[in-house]
Image (cartoon, rainbow, N blue to C red):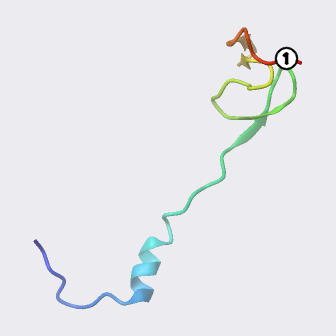
Amino acid sequence: MAHPKRKISKTRRDKRRTHYKAEAPTISTCSNCGASVKYHTVCSECGYYKGKLAIENAETE
């Protein structure tokens, strides 16, 4: 196991970790019903994906 020769300061450690952050998912609108949908997923409202019906028994009430 490698051991550090010097203590890494909290500032230096935190500077390295600034790039590890969660990003908000990209949201678009469904082309069929207009609901907000996350990219590359089937619309939970109408069951359409890229203009085609993907799920037949989606809740359409």
- Where residue 51 sits, quadrant-wise, is top right
Residue 31 on image: x %, y %: 82, 23
Q: Quadrant of residue 41?
A: top right
- Above or below 50: residue 15: below
Q: Is residue 4 left or right of residue 9?
A: left
The residue that disc 1 covers is 60
Quarter of the rendering occupied by the C terminus:
top right
Q: Residue at x 46, y 79 (%)?
A: 15
Q: Is residue 25 above or below residue 22?
A: above
> The N terminus is located in which quarter?
bottom left
Residue closest to the eye, 54 or 31: 54
Q: Position of residue 20 (x, y in %)?
A: 48, 64
The local secondary structure at tag 1 comes to loop
Rendered residue at 50%/72% (across/down)? 18
Q: Is residue 60 above or below residue 27?
A: above
Q: Quadrant of residue 9?
A: bottom left
The residue under the point 69% across, 13% down is 55
Residue under the point 54% across and 62% down = 21
Mark 1: which amino acid? Thr
Local packing at callout 1 (Cα closer than 10 Å; few below 14, some 14-19, many 20+) is: few
Residue 30: where, in percent of width, then height?
A: 80, 27
